[in-house]
Amino acid sequence: MGDFCQIDKQEIIKRYKPIDKYTHKGLRGHALIIGGSYGKMGSVVLASKACIKAGAGLVTAYIPKCGYDIVQISVPEVMVITDDYLEHIIKIDYKLQPQAIGIGIGMGQHPDTGHAFLNFLKMNKLPLVVDADALNILSQNKEWLSLLPKKTILTPHQKELERLIGEWNSEDEKLEMVRKICIEYDLIFVLKGVPTIIIDNTSTYENTTGNQALATAGSGDVLTGIITSLVAQSYKPIDAAIIGVYLHGLTADIAYPDVSYQSFIASDIIETLGEAYLHIIA
Ligand SMILES: NC(=O)C1=CN([C@@H]2O[C@H](COP(=O)(O)OP(=O)(O)OC[C@H]3O[C@@H](n4cnc5c(N)ncnc54)[C@H](OP(=O)(O)O)[C@@H]3O)[C@@H](O)[C@H]2O)[C@@H](O)CC1
Ligand SMILES: Nc1ncnc2c1ncn2[C@@H]1O[C@H](COP(=O)(O)OP(=O)(O)O)[C@@H](O)[C@H]1O
Ligand SMILES: [Mg+2]
């Protein structure tokens, strides 16, 4: 059944890379976040802000035109490239060479967006994090899984996973179904839940941080930003997933005593990321 590992502080310390004194933003990785659609631009604001706050040197958001002012005003640190179309993405076209790409948040499932996603998958060779509507589009086109680069990180919640692999009768059956896909396409799955479990071929990692304060809109979009940031910072995909999930949950554990479960929102995850980092290096 392969090895099982609990993600605790020791596992993070083994993987965490200190920041060199003489670094500069060009060495801290450039991440590209692709997503957004009319009414769901907040997901890209959250993911791209989380991405730069998790330590990427540069972050660019690729979004439909409707989101231009929203993202530029909400997160001045993040650069923006817009699709020609107003309300959703119909063509994914950019000149930059990022070190990691996070795709799908708030993207919607319009057929034109699906077509743009297919063309992107056909040409992309860069490390990838796939979430939300990109997962939902993959669920409707399962043959596209073979176009994903090796060690692509998929981050489904329960319903997104069900759409992708079908229904299961037990947790064990679910994990076996996921392992089969991981091995077939050499992928990494972050099964968001309570607890979040990461599957990398036959290895299984169980996160030990987080609480019900995370059950709030946008918290998965933030996780996508964090993991994409860590991949852009040259962490191996599996280490980016492990550290990302741990930090994400740790913010809720740190914040809960001050803000209760109800009043913790996705933006608070981003605001607490610095404290979470200090917890792991202290
Ligand atoms: N501010 C923004 O711009 C935001 C934008 N967002 C963007 O919206 C898009 C849609 O993403 P989404 O996750 O909200 O919708 P969807 O994929 O239909 O799944 C929701 C349904 O699944 C079910 N469900 C069962 N278990 C579940 C679980 N553990 N966690 C979650 N759901 C679970 C449950 O259905 P039920 O089980 O009740 O039938 C529930 O109704 C996506 O692109 C995302 O990035 C959001 O991030 C929010 C903030
Ligand atoms: N009760 C809970 N306890 C711990 N973590 C939770 C709980 N509910 C949700 N989460 C976490 O919150 C995030 C929700 O992701 P997702 O549903 O994709 O959010 P969204 O799409 O709204 O951004 C996941 O990381 C999940 O593990
Ligand atoms: Mg989500």
Image: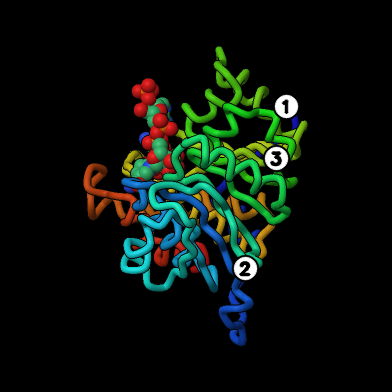
Residue reaching furthest to the front: 84
Q: Earlier in the sequence, mark 2 or mark 1?
A: 2
Circle 3 Cα neighbour tier, 10 Å, few/some/many (<14 / 14–19 / ≥20): many
Mark 3 is on which residue type?
Leu
* Helix, strand or loop status at disc 1: helix
Report, in whole angstroms, how far the alpha carbon at label 1 lies from the one at label 3.
10 Å
Disc 2 packing (10 Å; few <14; some 14–19; many ≥20): few
Mark 1 and mark 3 lie on one chain; the one further toward the N terminus is 1
- 217 vs 20, left or right, is left
Which of these two is toward me, 53 or 242? 53
Vertical side of 265 occupied by 3: above or below: above
Q: CA distance from mark 2 to mark 1?
A: 34 Å
Give the labeled residue for mark 3: 187
**Mark 3 CB within 8 Å of ligand 2:** no
**Camera-nearest label, 2 or 1:** 2
Q: Earlier in the sequence, mark 2 or mark 3?
A: 2
Residue 132: % across, % down: 48, 39
Give the residue number, with chain letter if any, for mark 2. Answer: 96
Which residue carries the number 1 mark? 180
